[in-house]
Amino acid sequence: IANESADETMKEANGEAIQTLASYTVSEAQIENLVTAKGYTDCVAYITAQECSVVLAGAVEEADTLIVQEVVMEQTGLTADKIKIIGTN
């Protein structure tokens, strides 16, 4: 963005990309906080334009999957088939 030789279109595209990544980072933190607030000891979320992956400490049961999916869908607008939930066991 700060490159003086870059044209305005390139600067604008890079600015939009940075804004998108910042938005993903905020959403990831919100998901992690909400999942932790629901009683899970540790959680890491990673969002891309197409999907979200969430890693939970320990084994993941079906009830866990539904709880985490609900949180992710509310925060991102993604559908359940775009959400991956992974346990560390």
Image: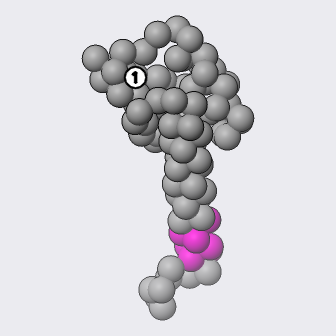
Extreme residue in the left direction? 89
Whether 67 is drawn above or below 13: the answer is: above
Coloring basis for residues: one colour
Residue under pointer 1:
86
Whether residue 47 can be seen here: no
Asked whether residue 12 is drawn in magenta, I would say yes
Q: Which residue is drawn at the image coordinates 54% and 17% (left, top)?
A: 65
Q: Give the x, y percent position of residue 81.
A: 59, 19
Whether 10 is drawn above or below 61: the answer is: below
Dot 1: element = strand
Please give the range of residues in magenta.
9-17
Amino acid at the residue labelled 1: Ile
Q: Nearer the viewer, residue 57 or 13?
A: 57
Q: Which residue is drawn at the image coordinates 34% and 21% (left, top)?
A: 58
Can you say which quadrant of the picture contains the C terminus?
Answer: top left
Instruction: Please name the predominant secondary structure of the magenta segment in the image.
Output: helix
Extreme residue in the top direction? 62
Q: Give the x, y percent position of residue 49.
A: 57, 42
Q: Give the x, y percent position of residue 13.
A: 59, 67
Q: Which residue is drawn at the image coordinates 56% and 37% (left, top)?
A: 37
Whether 26 is drawn above or below 88: the answer is: below
Whether residue 68 can be seen here: yes
